[in-house]
Amino acid sequence: MYPRTPGAGRSRLGRDRYRSIRLSFASVPPSESGRFRGSTERRRSVADLVVDGDELVLRLTRAEKLEAVHGDLREPLSSVTGVEVLDDAHKAADMLGFKVGTRIPGVVEVATVHGARTVFAAVHRDTPRGLRVSFSGAAQDEWVVGTTVPEEVAAAINAAR
């Protein structure tokens, strides 16, 4: 057999390869806010409803995108027919129908529900209050979204319409 020298072989090459990957991530330049790109995405823990020009956007976190098997949702503000503040968003998201996504009753509901209506729900245990946004002529009939300040978000959506 050949004598083995310490640090020789695959293990050394593997360590060098991973070290270079770590360095490349560490050298990502900061954005205008001074934070590294992607850091706000990691810190956000629940979905955000945002008015972007003439569209209403439901931005999902990375975890919610995996849970819902869905990406961010966009609908024109002209298709919004109503915004309702909900004291129990879990109850509003608990519907009969075929669900695509994740649902643990009372804990997390991030799914599209296909039943009499098509509803997208993004509600977590830490955001039991929320909003029901109704649409006409859109891919979903309603969005049920948990938020800590539903009155402020509803006012912003109504002001933008």
Image (cartoon, rainbow, N blue to C red):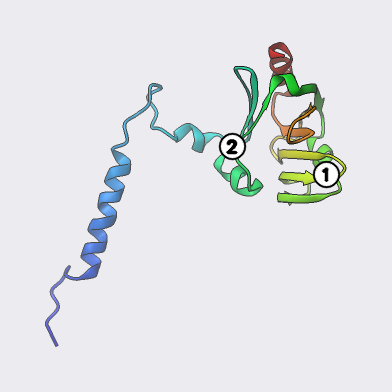
Q: Secondary structure at mark 1?
A: loop
Q: Is residue 2 above or below residue 88?
A: below
Give the Cα distance between marks 1 and 2: 21 Å
Disc 2 marks a residue whose amino acid type is Ser
Disc 1 marks a residue whose amino acid type is Asp
Question: Number of callouts in the render?
Answer: 2
Residue at 32%, 36% (x, y): give it: 28
Q: Residue furthest bottom?
A: 1
Q: Nearer the viewer, residue 30 or 83?
A: 83
User: Which residue is disc 2 drawn over?
Assistant: 45
Residue at 73%, 24% (x, y): give it: 150
Residue at 74%, 31% (x, y): give it: 138
Q: Is residue 143 left or right of residue 50?
A: right
Q: Is residue 101 left or right of residue 135?
A: left
**Which quarter of the picture shows residue 87?**
top right
Q: Is residue 18 above or below residue 90?
A: below
Return the x and y of residue 105 as percentages of the image width and height. 78, 49
| Nearer-N-terminus badge (1/2) | 2
Label 1: how many Cα within 10 Å (few below 14, some 14–19, many 20+): some
User: Which residue is disc 1 drawn over?
Assistant: 94
